[in-house]
Amino acid sequence: MRFSEIVKSIGKKECIRQNKNIQKTCSTILGNTILYLNHDLLGSQKRILLCYVSPLHIDYGKGDIYHPLFLHINQMIKVLIDMNFSIDICDCNDKHAIVQLSGKQYDYILGFGKVYTELVKRGQCRQSILFITENNPEVVERKYKERVEYFRQRHPHLSITSAIVRKGYFDKEQFEISDDAIVINSEYNIHSMRSYFRSVYQINVNGLFNKTFQYDALHIKKYRNSFVWFGSQGIIHKGLDVLVDAFRQLPECTLNIYGIPLSEIKIIKPLLTQNIRVHSPVNVLSDTFIEEVVRKNMFVLSASCSEGMMSGIATCMLYGLIPIVSKETGYNSHSSILEFENCKLENVISKIQEVQQYDLEKVSKLSKDSYIYAQQHFTLECFRSRFSEIMNDIVECKR
């Protein structure tokens, strides 16, 4: 892409999201690092570096946030301001930030990614806090290989060369060099991480919620056999292939698929049947999401092999959809969260057939329980409260 074309496209947010060249150009020209936020020249403050997703180019006033992390990064910063930190913020994988922050000393470095790794290894902080949004990278690698093999066993004639490998932002080295960890995950997934850190703090993901939404159960009878997968890239890792195979054998049920990237649609396209529908992306904070996703589905599914609390599940629960998930999806067990025994095809089919037998009263109760539980655990307010509690505990420990 020519530079002139990049400049013309800068104002188009969709283009920025989809084009890596434009993202790189924006990063180079505009930068991703914020220095000395909330700094008091007349007072004594602790210094912290937050290595995450830089909020520098996020317009919170437009109301079109497409991922929960853009909300909770804002609240993380607000908590750190309230705690009177002098704050530097950088994008976690911005190589320019490594140079810019060279030689600076911090009381705490919080985050993950290449910048986090490099600065912690250089000894630029008194205490390092790994903010973990995925599963243990060793578990991720092992589980993904198992899922690829399972797909090939079922569909040896189909290619999955375009499947996205779920390597993410984390590696074993980050676990080994960090003092403490804050983990968006379930206790089940956290178990394999505990040996790496002095302290591990669990925190729930926040979903995206449109506060104009009013809960009701009017659609339950009509759409009780409608299921939604509300995910993102990495469909083999997230088990969408298993769900598609299951619904091929459940023609009386509908599977609505949202969030699958164009590059991966061709993997499952040969497997699609009339009751399995791939939809265009939808803005969660729009009325379209409420009318098409919330009002026309009853259950939200995830058969992931390894997650850090799949945010799409929390989002759908906030509107009263009933989750059916694998234990590896990252949610603590609860009566309002149904679980697949495992993600083998026969067990996925069996669980879906089981919920089909529930009477309307039971389905209605599960929906209301899911809504209430999510409102008590997966809101942005819940995230902020828990993050504040964790950071105050870390600071008070004075390690």
Image (cartoon, rainbow, N blue to C red):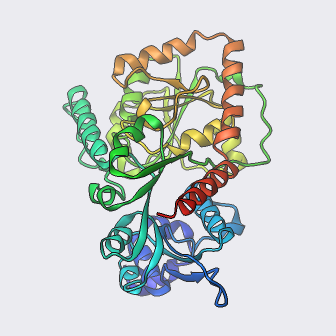
The residue at the point 69 percent across, 68 percent down is 82
Comparing 46 with 149, the one in front is 46
Q: Residue 177 in the image: state x and y as whole percent.
A: 31, 62
Q: Quadrant of the N terminus?
A: bottom left
Splitting the image into 4 quarters, where does residue 336 fall? top right
Is 197 left, or right, of 138 in this rendering? right
Comparing 381 with 260, the one in front is 381
Splitting the image into 4 quarters, where does residue 22 fall? bottom left
**In this rendering, is residue 398 above or below 259?**
below
Comparing 73 with 222, the one in front is 73
Q: Is residue 182 visible?
A: yes
The residue at the point 50 percent across, 34 percent down is 277
The residue at the point 43 percent across, 34 percent down is 188
**In this rendering, is residue 224 above or below 74?**
above
Q: Residue 351 in the image: state x and y as whole percent.
A: 47, 17
**In this rendering, is residue 240 above or below 136?**
above
Splitting the image into 4 quarters, where does residue 143 fall? top left
Q: Is residue 66 visible?
A: no
**In this rendering, is residue 314 above or below 76?**
above
Is 186 left, or right, of 345 in this rendering? right
Is 237 left, or right, of 33 in this rendering? left
Q: Residue 159 in the image: state x and y as whole percent.
A: 23, 41
Q: Residue 225 in the image: state x and y as whole percent.
A: 59, 20
